[in-house]
Image (cartoon, coloured by chain):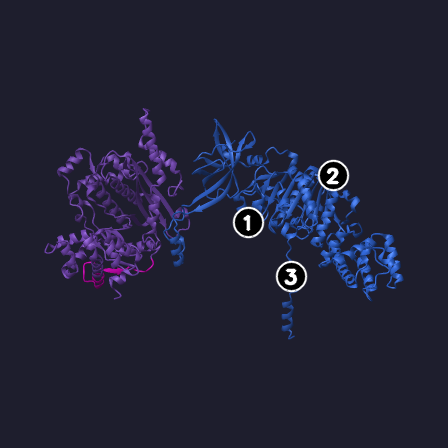
Amino acid sequence: MGDSPQHALHPDPDLFIRIAENALLVADDLRQDYFQSTLGIARSMREGFRSGSGKYQIAPVAPEPLSPCAVAFVDGGLSKIDVGIATPLIVRAGIFRVKQGEADLEKRETFDHFPLMLGQLRGGLKANSKYGDVVRQLVELGALVTALEDERFSDIRMLMLHGPLQFVSGPFFEHWFFPEDYELMLGKDERPHVLPVLSQFAAWCGKCPLKGTDRCKHDIDDQHLPAVCMLAFLQHYVFARAAEKDVLLCGVVERSFGRSVTRYVVRQMLEDSPDVFDRLLTVLDMKGRATNTQVEAILDATRYNDAILLSLALNRGEALEWYPVNPTLKVQDERVTLFPDVQNTFVRVNSGKYPMRIEVSASYDDSACGEVVRRSYEYASLLPGYAFPIGLDIVDKFAAIPGWMTKAYRQLILSEYGRLLTGEFVEMTDTEALKSMIMMRGSGRRSRETRPGV
Amino acid sequence: MDDNKRMPVGTVVGVSSTTEFQMQVRPDAVRAQDLVAIDTIEGGETFRVWAKVGTIERLNPLFPREAAQELAFQGRDPVDSVISLSREMITATCKVVGVQRDGRLEPPKYPVQPAGRVYVPPADEIESFLVGDTPEHRRLYLGTERGNKDVSVFVDGHMVVSRHLAVLASTGAGKTVATRKLLEELMIKGYPILIFDPHGDYSGLHIAKHTEVTTYLPEIRLADEEFDQVISYIRGMSGEAISAPQEQLLTGIMEVLTDESKRSQLSASLQDQEVGGLQKTVAHDHFYAIAEIAEKIAMLKGGDDRAPLPREISRLSTGLNVQSATANAVRRQSRKAGWQYWNMIKTNRKYAAASKKLPSGKDLHSIIKKGSVAIISLEGYSDELRQSIVAGILSRLLSERIDEKVPRFLTVIEEAHNFIPNRIDGADAPSLPIIKQIATEGRKYGMGLVFISQRPSRIDATVLSQANSYLILRIVNPNDQKYIRDVVETMGEDEAKALPNLNTGEALLSGLFTRIPVMVKVEKSRSEGKHEEEDFLAEVSAAQVPVAAEDSTGWSNGG
């Protein structure tokens, strides 16, 4: 009884509330069975994981202390303003490097940031809802490149990104940019390593298995460089450079609402103990259908996802065995195969919070994976109320676009609109606006960008 | 203005107003109460806005409490974690003092510019700003600005001597040293000073070269006192309540003692009654002369209280005819007062070495002279006696001053809460009415006052509020802090908050004698008091072998 799902939920009031909220969103006729089936799946997961009989297994996070090291954390931020329509405005990526055990603050910590006005870019489908996210991904990858190339970060043992290493989404595949857009996104003007890195892109394309396709030729003729190609290139680049420099590279996701683990477990249960879903399948009118179809119907109807179910399955201080990420399940575009392979795991830091998901390169061995989990767990244990690595929380605050800046820029734009309406000639480029913003933000190393108000 | 000499300290942020602004500060650049400046442009002209740093807040927004708690649980040093320790935000709130226009300080009419650069002006410019247009001959040097040792701080001496100054501080904060420094500066100018010194704190002023410093020893002259005052002395020094019959007898005895003819008649009558004549005089034996008569009356009444006193005695004063118990009580009270008084006199004479006897009433004016300091030694006296002495001296001198028989002078009252107590602590103090009168009217007669106290809340509020200048050192007692805030109009909230954290010798100057409230590190006075901090244990150690060592010697010898 001690291992029952009800027992597992008992000390997790937060999680219970989340499941209850989720239950309110499922169809009314399913709600009666929702708790029972959710707990049934969780029980099956717990038993399966612990018996070692299934595809996924769990293991406790090794408690041995790790030697102090230098770590860099990277995160991006995006702000939008509402001037008639919601428009992405500024993208920023920040880097926070810290050397544990170093008392001299000058040597201990390094902060860097990459502000980018989206108005500076010529390419991209600006009306597309994922436009800002694509640019943010590219700017974040630019930050990872800097963390690996810039001398100021040369001592890092670990490089941690706030978010998945492999972030692919269908709408991403529609975007393209001009070469100078990528230079801006990577910060060419201030970073001497950007052009040498980008200069390797052509060579990488030369080895691309999709080279010579019509789409590829068409893009090259128009100088339209697809964002996914650059994303894939940069991911390969940072994976390779991290490996060369013996830097552990990982991405940590705060709330992972993917379904890969859940999908597997539901399928297993349908095969091993179909009676758990008997009533549900009847209501959904899925009796007798193919297992794959039934699984997807159950997932859609119940809104089950990995974060919720693994919260029930994992105890505090436990991690799922690493398993590969398969992007082809989400995206049907052939270019998805260009991305490097990654593997991921879930780690539970606090019994009242969702487990965090960690991604690393598929090439990492057990030792590297173990160190990543242990360091991530250690950093997250400092924020038990958030259950997420504190270094990422710090860089998140650092890279966040403060509200006052967005408001100020909105005022500026409205003011310029006003002058235009009165017939006054206005010449203001985004570059100048950016300078104004940076000036307002305050200059110098001790800038006030994280101040909650002004 | 030379820009190169300015030390930039911060940048104006947020909403600025005509009364205050906030700035983000460079680490370690300023301290609370420091003077800073920022330039402002009005009508095309640049003016300097002066401001004082109030509260300074320091925050590391990237160091959550939650993480600190975890580190504490784990017993880890934050340095060993991955938490950021470097990105602090230091925000200072500055109170605008005024805009400097052609040397004048005016209230600002327009806020300072956000993003404006705040700086510390060169020391000579701050000094010149603080001095303002005070003429050279009126300046008294007190020390240096607390946050900037290159800035000398002067106060306007005219405002000290012509009006009233309150020196307030907790014990040991340096109020007496600060006052001595101020007095030494006044002595250089030759201004007459009268000091009521209960603890010998000003004995060191004798080292002054060009000033005549005299310590006077006041003594009670019962024959010159009002009878009520004599009764008051006896009540105070005996510690006993005086009943109506006892008051009647005391009045009767004083009637006789102050009239030589009556005294002779009483002495003769007492001899006739075979209880012996009078041996003691009020001039020589003070309270014991009263006790002697009371004793004789008790003897006369001892046999039968109902029998009246002989006519030749009772006709000298109706007050003499009392019961024996009353006479005995008066005898006891007078003796106690006499014993107490002689003890006080003995103590005072011991401490006030090289002192002079305080001239009697009509000659009292002689102690106030240009280029001289008169110290009235009150050591050893009870509070009641001190109050009476101060009241008597000041009443006489006020009268002399009104008649212009003495020059203008400054009176320094140490332990002022004992002489001008508030209503709760002693509204009947005899010194209170005269000091209150001088505080309210003294200015027109040229009688300045300096009140010094470690318990400001026990000072009469009316008198304290008459002070126009304040020299306030560290104040720890919350009641005193609140009292000062309520009474001192020129004191701001931030300044009041800074008071408990001042170091010894650091003071806030506020009021008419300074252009703006300023924190000063008072220079140590050249003179010292008689009871400066001594290391009593060191003295004992040097003088003798420790008892324990003697004992252990005995043990080793088998003793």
Give left or right: position of A210 versus B211.
left
Q: Residues within 10 Å of mark 3 (few under 14, many from 20)?
A: few
Image height of B103 relative to A232, above or below = above
Q: Return the disc, 3 or 2, that comes first in the chain's sequence.
A: 2
Q: Position of residue B329 (x, y in %)?
A: 76, 62
Q: Return the disc, 1 or 2, that comes first in the chain's sequence.
A: 2
- The residue closer to the viewer here, B34 or A9, is A9
Q: Residues within 10 Å of mark 1 (few under 14, many from 20)?
A: some
State if disc 2 and disc 3 touch (CB < 8 Å): no
Chain letter of the residue carrying label 2:
B
Which residue is rendered at x = 37% and y = 41% of the image? A449
Q: Secondary structure at mark 3?
A: helix
Residue located beneath label 1 in the image: B500
Tell me the shade of chain A: purple
State if disc 2 and disc 1 touch (CB < 8 Å): no
Q: Position of residue A314 (x, y in %)?
A: 26, 59
In the rendered image, the residue lying farthest to the bottom is B558
Discs 1 and 2 share one subunit: yes
- The residue closer to the viewer here, B43 or B230, is B230
Q: Residues within 10 Å of mark 2 (few under 14, many from 20)?
A: some
Q: Secondary structure at mark 2?
A: helix
Q: Which residues are magenta?
A: A46-65
Which residue is rendered at x = 73% and y = 49% of the image? B389
Identify residue type, mark 3: Ser
Image height of A56 relative to B217, above or below = below
Residue located beneath label 2 in the image: B402
